[in-house]
Image: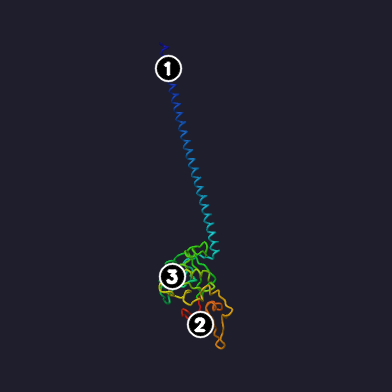
């Protein structure tokens, strides 16, 4: 009997030991799993951090590249503007169809074109031309371009106005689409009006005006003479490009009568060779035939 109880005790001890060992094993396994999960979480966090750092670095590099590209584009544009002689300006107000004032106070007379008068005196289609220029230019940024002359006798700078920067400023398509001087002529708001030496685009303007006149566009609806003075007026050849290039060995550009001191010029082209800004009515070279707008100043620009 004593041995029986001893056996029972041994079995109980063995069972207890086995249970304890099993519990320890379970706890150990649980601990390992917990460590593995923690490690996995750490790895995922590390990967996310690395990914975030890589994305941030890529974004910074992209921003740097974009900034470099912008600076390079700005540099190329500046060089292009300088090559074409273009100046970026803002139009503060429109004075009339062919005269504007810039935000810096400078007044600009558009060269190569003449719109009907709408300020001190009024010509047919003058208000329409002025309103059109206002709708297209006032408050806008444009690019002005000098031909040869700097300013007229009224201290207005003489310029071409571009609505957009041309790639090639002598390309006819770009002239039609981007130059406002041409736009005025194409749409019948202005007549071509050439005053040497500013003749860079005069042939284009005359061509555009002929097209507009054939279609009775704008001011040309009033008749083949339009409503203001210009290169296409009947009998007017003094201001066209071709006549400005003519020379004659048989005709003297000027002559002076003996006693009166009066100077005679056959046209404004010849007169401006001596008096670039024209002459007043009390000047010896004044002739009424050269004062087409009857303002007591002949052959003004």
**Quadrant including the N terminus:** top left
Q: Residues within 10 Å of mark 3 (few under 14, many from 20)?
A: few
Q: How far apart are the two marked residues, 2 and 1, measured between alpha carbons?
A: 143 Å
Q: Residue at x 45, y 65 (%)?
A: 140
Label 2 secondary element: loop
Residue at the right extreme, as displayed: 249
Q: Is residue 182 above or below residue 281?
A: above
Label 1 secondary element: helix
Q: How far apart are the two marked residues, 2 and 3, measured between alpha carbons?
A: 33 Å
Counting from the top left corner in percent of width and height, residue 110 is at 48, 70
Comparing labels 2 and 3, the label whose residue is closer to the camera: 3
What number of labels is visible? 3
Name the one closer to the observer, 27 or 93.
Answer: 93
Label 3 secondary element: helix
Instruction: Identify the residue position indicated by label 2 in the image.
Output: 287
Residue 140 visible in the displayed image: yes
Q: Residues within 10 Å of mark 2 (few under 14, many from 20)?
A: many
Counting from the top left corner in percent of width and height, residue 296 is at 48, 81
Name the one closer to the observer, 68 or 258.
Answer: 258
**Apparent side of residue 248 relative to residue 177 in the rendered image (left or right):** right
**Apparent side of residue 244 relative to residue 131 in the rendered image (left or right):** right
Q: Earlier in the sequence, mark 2 or mark 3?
A: 3
Counting from the top left corner in percent of width and height, residue 175 is at 49, 65
Q: Earlier in the sequence, mark 3 or mark 1?
A: 1
Instruction: Identify the residue position indicated by label 1 in the image.
Output: 11
Instruction: Identify the residue position indicated by label 3 in the image.
Output: 214
Q: Quadrant of residue 129?
A: bottom left
């Amino acid at each position: 009997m004593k041995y029986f109880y001893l056996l029972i005790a041994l079995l109980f001890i063995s069972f207890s030991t086995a249970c304890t060992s099993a519990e320890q094993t379970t706890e150990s396994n649980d601990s390992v799993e917990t460590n593995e999960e923690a490690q996995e979480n750490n790895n995922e966090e590390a990967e996310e951090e690395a990914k975030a750092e890589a994305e941030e670095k890529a974004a910074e590099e992209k921003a740097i590249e974009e900034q470099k590209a912008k600076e390079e584009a700005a540099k190329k544009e500046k060089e292009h503007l300088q090559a074409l002689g273009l100046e970026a300006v803002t139009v503060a107000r429109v004075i009339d169809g062919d005269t504007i004032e810039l935000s810096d106070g400078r007044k600009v007379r558009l060269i190569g074109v003449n719109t009907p008068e709408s300020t001190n005196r009024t010509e047919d289609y003058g208000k329409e031309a002025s309103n059109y220029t206002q709708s297209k230019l006032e408050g806008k940024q444009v690019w002005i371009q000098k031909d040869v002359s700097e300013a007229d006798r009224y201290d207005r700078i003489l310029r071409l106005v571009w609505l957009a920067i041309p790639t090639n400023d002598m390309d006819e398509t770009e002239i039609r689409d981007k130059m406002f001087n041409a736009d005025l002529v194409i749409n019948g708001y202005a007549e071509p009006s050439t005053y040497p030496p500013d003749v860079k685009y005069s042939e284009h303007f005359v061509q555009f005006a002929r097209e507009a006149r054939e279609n009775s566009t704008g001011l040309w609806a009033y008749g083949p003479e339009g409503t203001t003075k210009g290169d296409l007026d009947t009998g007017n050849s003094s201001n066209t490009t071709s006549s400005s290039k003519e020379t004659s060995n048989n005709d003297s550009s000027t002559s002076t009568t003996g006693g009166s001191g009066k100077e005679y010029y056959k046209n404004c082209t010849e007169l401006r060779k001596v008096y670039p800004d024209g002459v007043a009515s009390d000047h010896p070279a004044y002739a009424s035939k050269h004062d087409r707008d009857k303002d007591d100043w002949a052959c003004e620009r």
